[in-house]
Image (spheres, helix red, strand yellow):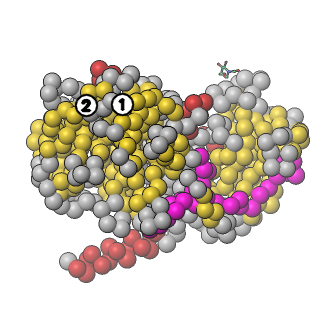
Amino acid sequence: MLRLLALVQVAIYTLTASAASWIAPGAIWYDSAGARIDAHGGMIIKPGNVFYWVGQSWDSNTSPRIYSSEDLINWDNRGLANSIEWLYRPKLFVSGGRYHIWGQVNRLTQGMASTNIATGYTTYGSPMSIPPDSYTFSDCGVFADTDGNDYWVTSADHNIIAINKINGGTQATVGDRVAYLSLGAYEAPALFKVGSVYFLIVSSKTGYRANPDKLFWATNLAGPWTGPSDIAPESTNTYNSQSTFVLTIAGSSQTTYMFMGDDWDSDGTDQSNYEWLPASVSTSAHSVTLQNYAYWKVNPTTGVVTTSSTGKRYEAEHATIAGRAAVADCESCVTKRGVHQIDRRSNVTFADVEGLGTGERQWMSLHYTVNNATAGDAFVHVNGEKFRVGDLNTRAGRHATVPVSVVLQKKNVITFSAESDDESFEARLDGIEVLDGTEEEIEVQL
Ligand SMILES: *[C@@H]1O[C@H](CO)[C@@H](O)[C@H](O)[C@H]1NC(C)=O
Ligand SMILES: *[C@@H]1O[C@H](CO)[C@@H](O)[C@H](O)[C@H]1NC(C)=O
């Protein structure tokens, strides 16, 4: 048995050796075996030195899937917690010496537990309704308070957010209602605590289309709750995402709060990505503000957040320009020059882009804007292979920096193009940047 465990360990470390280097919000993320990560509407806990991420797996009919990581960047797929299907927004907590996953099945709460956090969860009890009046719900969150109590937060039906105590044990149950909040038509609750202030992040109800998440705060779970305020500029629609959880990383130098959002595609499928961003939190101003980085990481020991220096840059105005596209002044561009009027008859080609050439994925940033994100798409052609940028990163067309992970050879031909049926659609390209592992970490203050 011990020998087998040791072998498994070695296998995991061999896989993580080809490592991703940054959290790149909105981009497709791959696990350590090279498969696309599939864990939506979930959360993370860290009982020891390892982070465990549970989320609903689209490819397994929304069974809860678990990944583990020591750095929040390189994730090992630990398989399904349980083969139960159509369990939405799974959440993990510890009670009665067991790990519990709860989620929504048919608008009720199904519980399951295991003594091993990564595997072997067995369901217990029948699906639970929410006391005191069998309230039903669609979205759920869990909150572990500093006094050891756990709470189940439910939303969406009735336009109410309910907070109920969890009666712990080896088979936990939904306990007494603590709060019943008619704050508005909200869902996707993420509740966390900083000092003596409780913060509740919620989204509006717009299906799988992102909207500006809202923040409420209170000094008592029962309320009064004050809000709403914004956590990101309204026009960004929470950087195209919907809240699912806020992870507290209590480091030796600082405590960092990581917002976890889902970059849902229009149907909530496996094409949905993840929007994780560090947040600035003020308990005196009662504010939570997402900090928008294209690449970032948090040191799990110190809690310190760093972002990346630029990689090797290639300016659009120095590339080969085909069709109607032309060099133009560009106030927001790094060199104040860029290429505009990129459309279905026009493109920009970078002939000698340097890559790792190892067969591993690496990050490349596309710095571009479009005049209407719903009217058309940008494309990137890597050595003749064509990708819709929106298939590689759900921020495509909506943010000026779009990280994509690609396999590059030592020398590469990369063409940027744009397509739309709308004659007035155009993309403007500032340049591209390739991260090759030599970029520096820059510490940021939250
Ligand atoms: C770039 O545009 C030119 C001119 O329209 C076209 O001939 C060429 O095929 C395009 N290249 C790619 C990779 O789309
Ligand atoms: C953007 O494009 C969409 C789809 O073509 C169109 O319906 C909308 O009116 C456009 N918006 C603007 C501001 O032009």
Q: Which residue is mark 2?
A: 179
Image location of residue 286, percent across then percent down = 46, 39
Q: Is mark 1 within 8 Å of ligand 2?
A: no
Residue depicted at x 45% and y 51%:
257
Q: Nearer the viewer, residue 346 or 298?
A: 298
- Residue 76 shows in the view: no
On screen, 78 above or below 197? below
Q: Ligand 2 falls in which quarter?
A: top right
Q: Nearer the viewer, residue 148 or 113?
A: 148
Is 296 within the magenta? Answer: yes
| Magenta range | 292-320
Residue depicted at x 14% and y 55%:
96
On screen, 360 above or below 373? below
Identify the element where label 2 is drawn.
strand
Q: Amino acid at mark 1?
A: Trp
Q: Is residue 208 left or right of residue 198?
A: right
Q: Quadrant of the N terminus?
A: bottom left
Q: Which residue is mark 1?
A: 225
Residue 3: image quadrant is bottom left
Is 283 within the magenta? Answer: no
Image location of residue 319, percent across then percent down = 85, 51
Image location of residue 341, percent across then percent down = 82, 34
On screen, 136 above or below 49? above
Q: Between marks 2 and 1, how big is the CA–CA gap?
A: 10 Å
Of the numbered discs 2 and 1, the one sitting upstream in the chain is 2
Identify the element where label 1 is drawn.
loop
Label 1 crowd bin: few (<14), some (14–19), many (20+), radius 10 Å:
many
- What's the mark number on residue 39? none
> Circles 2 and 1: CB distance less than 8 Å?
yes
